[in-house]
Image (cartoon, rainbow, N blue to C red):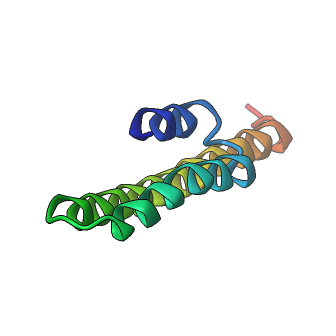
């Protein structure tokens, strides 16, 4: 599950409207199941997965914003007039 989420983050994170719901659909059921099972390790697993989910989501959003900013910058450079000598 963590490998799947990492693959999604790398493969389609520049499309967060696809990547984030995909990761949520994969991780939330595992977090819920971990909280439902008794034992010391399962709630800890849920907390770790929730932290990875939060960090991964923030990372995907930041990567998307950086990509949009780079594209906008390239467009601005292309539109700017050539300097005269």
Name the residue rendered at 26%, 57% in the picture: 45
Q: Nearer the viewer, residue 40 or 31?
A: 40
Name the residue rendered at 32%, 64% in the picture: 37
Name the residue rendered at 60%, 30% in the picture: 11
Q: Nearer the viewer, residue 11 or 62?
A: 11
Q: Nearer the viewer, residue 55 or 68?
A: 55
Name the residue rendered at 62%, 49% in the picture: 64
* Apparent side of residue 43 relative to residue 7 in the rendered image (left or right): left
* Apparent side of residue 32 relative to residue 61 in the rendered image (left or right): left
In the rendered image, the quadrant that contains the C terminus is top right
Residue 82 screen position, x and y as percent? 80, 35
* Apparent side of residue 15 relative to residue 35 in the rendered image (left or right): right
Most distant residue in the front direction: 38
Numbered label tally: 0
Residue 7 screen position, x and y as percent? 51, 31
Most distant residue in the left direction: 40
Residue 54 screen position, x and y as percent? 42, 63
Vertical side of 72 occupied by 38: above or below: below
Q: Nearer the viewer, residue 61 or 43?
A: 43
In the rendered image, the quadrant that contains the N terminus is top left
């Amino acid at each position: 599950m963590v490998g799947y989420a990492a693959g999604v983050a790398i493969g389609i994170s520049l499309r967060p409207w696809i990547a984030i719901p995909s990761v949520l659909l994969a991780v939330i059921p595992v977090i819920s199941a971990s909280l439902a099972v008794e034992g010391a390790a399962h709630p800890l697993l849920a907390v770790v997965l929730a932290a990875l989910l939060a960090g991964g989501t923030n990372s995907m959003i930041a990567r998307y914003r950086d990509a949009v900013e780079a594209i906008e910058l390239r467009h601005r450079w292309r539109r700017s007039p050539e300097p005269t000598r």
